[in-house]
Amino acid sequence: MANGSSSGLSSRSSKEGARSKKDVHSRTPQQCRRRESHPLESPSRRRFSGSFLESSSSSTVPSVDWGNFLTLEMGAHPPGSPRPPRSPRSRRSSLSSHSMRPPVSPRLLRSPRRSGPCGRRASCDWMVEMMGGGAPCRQGLSEVCNKVLQHVSHAIAAEQCSFALVADDRAGGKGLSGVVFRSYKEDPQGQSQRACEKSFMELVVATGKSINIKNVFEDARFSPEVDDLSGSRPKCLLSLPVYNPREELVGVAIAINKTAAAGINYNQHFFSEEDEKVMTTHMAMLGVILDNALLCENAEQESKRSQVLLDLARLLQERHESRESLLNKLASTILPITRAKLCTVFIIDSTKKDSFSYIIDTENMGLDEYKTSCKRESDVNRICHAYAVHVKNTLKEVNVANVSTEGSVSMLDQMTEEAGDEMRTLVCTPVRNGRDGKVIGVCQLVNKQNDEAGKAESFGRADERLLEDFALYCGVSLQNFEIQQRAEQTRAKQEVTREILSYHMSATEEEIMALQESSIPPAQNLSLLDFHFSDFGLPDSVTTQATVRMFIDLNLVQDFDIDYKSLCRWVLSVRRGYRRDVAYHNWNHALSTAQSMFALLKGTGHLQSHFSSLEILALMIATLCHDLDHRGVSNSYIARSQQPLAQLYGHSSLEHHHYDVCVLILNNPGSEILSGLSQENYQQCLQMIEKSILATDLALYMTKREAFFQMAEKDNIRWQDEDHRELLKSMLMTASDISAITKPWPVQKKAASLIASEFFAQGDREKNEFNIRPIDVMNRENSTRFPSMQVEYINGICAPLYKGCMNNRENWERLAAGEEDDVFETDG
C-alpha cells in the first residue's frame, strides 16, 4: 500500500481511477458469459487484478465471472479450479445444447454445499435470490441495500458495513453523492469514524482500486487528528468500488473492524483475502441489484412525471381568477413529487435589470396543505432572489447541493448571506414565454425534504426535469392567462362602450350650427379670468360658448389648426358625456375645473409661458374631460359592486374610464380636434391627457404632494426637468379639481351641499345593496356633522394646496359650532 498524507486521500482525480480500471481489464482474461436473453444478463463484468495498491496490505482479488456462479448447478467449475480441455466439436455441441434450453430462473440456481457464511466462495444463494426475486422494485433501494449490507457483515464477520452512492461532479468526474446506506444504526457521536470512512471511500472513487488495511493506525494516510478517543475509531477496514453491468462506477462499499463469527475461528483481526473475495462477489451482485432498482425507480419516476404532466395540462384548461391562484395550483402539483419545501416563481420586471415585479411563494406544509403568499418589491426580504437573478441573467439552470458552500463562486458571493439558515439546497430554472421564448420569470425549488435523515437533500436529475416541465407549463399558463385577461377586458370594454352609447346621444346638427354661428363673448364678460367664477345659473349655451372662448384665448385653435366646427361638435359631445342625474360630478363641475385651469394659466402671467402649446392643449382637454361619464359613486363602490369598470381597470377605475371616454370622443368622426397634429405630437398629447386625468385621483395626489411642497418651499423648481414639470401639472389638475373650496362662501356652500347629496346617495346604496355601514362622510345619519367633516377635508386635503380657503374653513367651523342650522337640504 502506497504511503501518503491524509490530506491526499481525496486529491486524486476520477480520471486516474478510470485509467486504473482500464489497466485492470487489460490484465484480466475474458471468461464465460451468459447469453444475452437471460434476465440477469449484463451483470458487472468488472475484473479485478491481484494488486490494486502497491503495498503488503493491498488485496489480491480474483476475477468474478457471472457465468461461473450462476451455473454451478449445471456442472460449471468454481472460480480458480482447472477446467478439462474441450475439443471445438464438443464446445459447439455444448453451446448448441445450452442455447436450446430455456432460461434458468436464478431462484433455481443453488450451490451444492456450504462451508461457512455464503459457502466462503464466489456464489451466494441469498444474493442470487435477491437479484431474481424483484426485491429492489418491491422493497425499495434503501431497504434492499440495508439487507445486503447486513448480510455481507455477517458473511465476512465485519462489525459494520456501509455503502455510498457515487454521482457525477461538476468537473466531469465522480464523487460521493452524500447518499449512504449502513448495516447499523448511525451513532450521532461517531463523527471522526465517519470522517475517516469518507476519506477512504473518496480514495477508492479517485483510484478505482480496492483497499484492505489491516491496521488503520499503521497506515501513513490515516490522520490521528480525526482519532476518536471514545474507542469507536476503526481498526481495520476493507473498501472496494461497485460497478453496474455497463462498467460504470455506481458506489463504494466499506467494511470496518473484523469480529469473530460464530462457528468460525479467526486468529487474525483483519479482513483476509477470502473476505475480500466474498465481499467482491456480493458487491458485484449489488451492482446488478442497483441497476435493477434504478430501472424500477426510473419507471416509477416516469409514471409520476406523466401524472404530473397530465395534471399540469388539466390546469391549462381551467379558468383562474388571478396569477397567484394559477401559480399556486401549478406549484401544488409539483411540490409533492419533488418533496421540495418551497416552490417560488419570480416574475421579471421588464423596467428594471435585477428586479422582479412580484413573487409567488408556495410552501409545502405537509398533508396536502400548501401556503401561498404573493410578495411585491417591498416584501421580499425573506426570499433569497440572488440565484433567480443569476438564472435570469445567464439563462442557465442552477442546481445547488449545498448553499452554504456556494459562496466561493465569485458571481454568487453574497448568496450564502442572503439565503440564511433556511435555504440549504435548491434548483432554479428560467421560465420562458410560450409565444416567443422570451424569459419572463424564474422558478425555484428549495430544500428537498428527507424524512429519514431529517434534513434537506440535494435535487437530482429527475427533479431538474420536473422543474423544467413545470417552467414550460408556467410560461404557457401565464401566456394563456394574459390572453384570457385581455379577452375579458375587451369584452368588459365593449359592454361599457355599449352602455355609454345607449345612454348618450350625439349632438344634433341644430345644436352644432347654433354654437358655430353664435357670437362668443369675450373672457371678461364671462368672468373667465376671475377666480370667483361660478357656473351656477349659467344656461347650457353660455357654458359651451365659454369653453370655446378659452380655447380661442389660449391660441389653441390657431396653433393646432383646429377646425372650428369640429371644436363646436367636440365641446357639445363632451357636455353630453356627463350624466345630468349626477348631483355634483357633472358638466358644470367640468366647466368650473377648466375655468380654474384657464385662470391659473392666464391670470398668473408667467405660468403659461413655461408650458408648451401642446402641454396647455392637453391640460385644457384633461380638465374638461376629467370626470366624463361619472356615475356619482366612488372607486370603492365600483369595486365592491363588481361593475365592469372594476374588472376592466382594477385601480383608479373611474379615472381610467374618464380617459377612455375622452379618447372615444376625440376619435368620433366630426369631433377630431387633434387631427392637425403629427403622429408624434398626437401620441404625446394623449399621454399627457391620460397622466393629467389620472392625477385627479386623490389617492395619487396624497402620494405626490409632499415632494411638491418641499420643492415649492425651497423654490428650486427646474422647468427643464421633466419630472418637475409633470409634478407641477399634476398639482395644477388637483388644484383645479377642488377649486370650489376657494369660491365665495355662497358658491362654496352650494357646492358642498351638492357633494353631500351625492355622497349620502352612495351611502344609502351601500346600506341597501351590501348591508354595510357607510363611512362617516357618506352616512346620511351624520348629516348634522357635515360641517365638521368639511373642516377635516379642508385641513387634510385643501389647505396644504390652497391658502385662499381659510375664510371658508372659518365659516364651516362656525357652522360646526352651531351658529347656523339647516344649511344643507339633502334628499331623503
Image: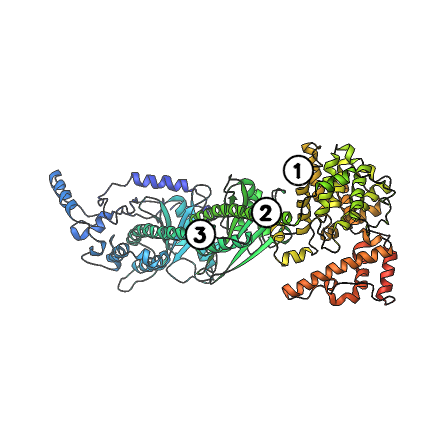
Does the CB distance between marks 1 and 3 fall below 8 Å? no
Q: In which quarter of the image is residue 605?
A: top right
Disc 3, SS: helix
Residues packed near mark 2 inside 10 Å, few (<14), some (14 to 19) or many (20 plus): few
Q: Give amino acid for label 3.
A: Arg
In the rendered image, the vertical position of residue 43 relative to residue 749, given as above or below: above
Q: Give amino acid for label 2.
A: Gln
Of residues 633 and 669, the one nearer the viewer is 669
Residue 594 appearing in the image: no
Disc 1, SS: loop
Q: Earlier in the sequence, mark 1 or mark 3?
A: 3
Of residues 373 and 181, the one nearer the viewer is 373
Residue 460 in the image, given as x and y percentages of width and height: 44, 49
On the image, numbered disc 2 is attached to which residue? 494
Residue 764 in the image, given as x and y percentages of width and height: 69, 64
Q: Earlier in the sequence, mark 3 or mark 2?
A: 3
Q: Is residue 492 left or right of residue 522?
A: left
Quarter of the rendering occupied by the C terminus: bottom right
